[in-house]
């Protein structure tokens, strides 16, 4: 009996440590807070799907019909659940204008997704629920990224897709 109980406790500990390792969770996270109906998207932009439920927004990146990455934000723009998505900051995005995209990737890592339809438009999700997209002078796919000419910032929690555009002068 004691062996069975000890075995059960060990299995639960291993399972909980394994599950915890697949998500980075902040101190305000509670399981019931992150459950959002994901049958009807609030917004869609290419592979980015946003679902709204109560005061939470689930941001999914979908590739070939499968959810690849996910982050959950509160309505106060705080990330409360993150599935290994390296969120970026939004401080001074104009510093990336006229910079080669390969240098940007060195600083920010690989883009979270490509929102282009025919052109390569790499995009990153920010730590305050925005999508920052980079348009280049040679937007024809990874490896041929070119130099950033425009930066488009979308608010993922807003009702519409209005964007802030930062351009080279």
Image (cartoon, rainbow, N blue to C red):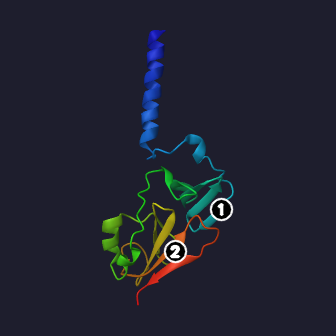
User: Residue at position x 65%, y 62% from top?
Assistant: 42
Q: Is residue 100 left or right of residue 10?
A: left
Q: Residue furthest bottom?
A: 169
User: Residue at position x 46%, y 32% from top?
Assistant: 15
User: Residue at position x 46%, y 38% from top?
Assistant: 19
Rendered location of residue 153, percent (x, y): 50, 73
Quadrant, the C terminus: bottom left
The vertical placement of 40 against 134, above or below, is above
Q: Residue furthest front?
A: 76
Asked if one can make out residue 164 in the rendered structure from this viewpoint, the answer is: yes
The residue tagged with tag 2: helix, strand or loop?
loop
- Dot 2 alpha-carbon crowd within 10 angstroms: few under 14, some 14 to 19, many 20 or more: some
Rendered location of residue 24, percent (x, y): 43, 47
Residue named by callout 2: 116
N-term-proximal mark, 1 vs 2: 1
Total numbered labels: 2
User: Residue at position x 53%, y 71% from top?
Assistant: 154
The residue tagged with tag 1: helix, strand or loop?
loop
The vertical placement of 16 against 153, above or below, is above
Residue named by callout 1: 42
Front residue of 126/142: it is 126
């Amino acid at each position: 009996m004691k062996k069975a109980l000890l075995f059960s406790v060990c299995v639960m500990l291993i399972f909980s440590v394994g599950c915890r390792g697949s998500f980075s969770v902040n101190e305000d996270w509670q399981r019931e807070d992150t459950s959002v109906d994901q049958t009807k998207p609030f917004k869609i932009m290419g592979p980015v799907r946003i679902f709204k439920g109560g005061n939470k927004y689930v941001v999914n990146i979908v590739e070939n019909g499968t959810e690849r990455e996910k982050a959950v934000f509160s309505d106060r723009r705080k990330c409360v659940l993150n599935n290994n998505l390296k969120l970026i900051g939004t401080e001074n995005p104009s510093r990336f204008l006229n910079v080669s995209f390969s240098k940007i990737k060195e600083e920010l890592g690989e883009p979270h997704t490509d929102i282009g339809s025919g052109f390569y438009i790499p995009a990153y999700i920010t730590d305050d629920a925005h999508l920052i997209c980079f348009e280049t002078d040679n937007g024809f796919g990874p490896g041929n990224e070119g130099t950033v000419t425009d930066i488009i910032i979308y608010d993922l929690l807003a009702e519409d897709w209005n964007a802030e555009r930062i351009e080279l002068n």
